[in-house]
Image (cartoon, rainbow, N blue to C red):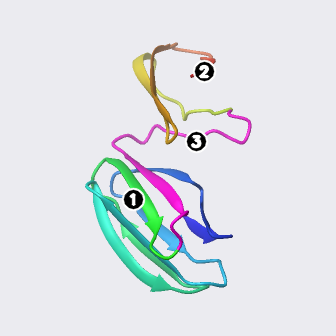
Amino acid sequence: MEQKDQAFGPRVLAVPVGATVAFPNRDPIFHSVFSVSPVKRFDLGKYGRGKSKSVRFAKAGVVNVYCDIHSDMEAFVLVLTTHVFTQPDGNGAFALPPVPAGDYTLHVWHPDRPELKREVQVPASGELALDLDW
């Protein structure tokens, strides 16, 4: 999750439990990445351009990430108990990795909207197309 142009990128990063996330600073100024979220509290301290620090996420949940120097910088690490997840492209389109046929609950998470849940039945063959709208 890079720091560039005084913003985190991407704003939302989904990772499985146990993942380590790097926070490289690509700005010509110092940043100080931290979180006070109960899921994972950390403070990486101040560091400049070209430096990177990492955090391991061992517990599932939403971790709000901020910069102590720039109060308008905010991001989210969504730590998941599953390996079946994806993030939409710039047009909102997404594709999940293949999963076995069966009944599932699809969870859609966005930091500015309520969570959306949809029961889906994955067929034994072919694709499943969904239109999701808040």
- Closer to the chain start, of discs 1 and 3, is 1
Q: Is residue 87 magenta?
A: yes
Please state which amino acid type lies under the numbered disc 2.
Asp
Q: Nearer the viewer, mark 1 or mark 2?
A: 2
33 or 69: nearer the eye?
A: 69
27 or 91: nearer the eye?
A: 27
Q: Check the image and name the residue furthest to the front.
A: 71
Please state which amino acid type lies under the numbered disc 3.
Gln
Q: Is residue 28 above or below residue 38?
A: below
Which type of secondary structure does the marked residue at label 1 adopt? loop
Give me the disc on residue 19: 1
Pointers 2 and 3 in contact (C-beta within 8 Å): no
Q: Is residue 94 above or below residue 13?
A: above
Look at mark 3 in the image and give the residue it sits on: 87
109 or 89: nearer the eye?
A: 109
* 2 lies left or right of 14: right
Tell me the quadrant of the picture where the C terminus can be found: top right
Pointers 1 and 2 in contact (C-beta within 8 Å): no
How packed is label 2: few (under 14 Cα within 10 Å), some, or many (20 or more)? few
- Closer to the chain start, of discs 1 and 2, is 1
- Closer to the chain start, of discs 2 and 3, is 3
Q: CA distance from mark 2 to mark 3?
A: 15 Å
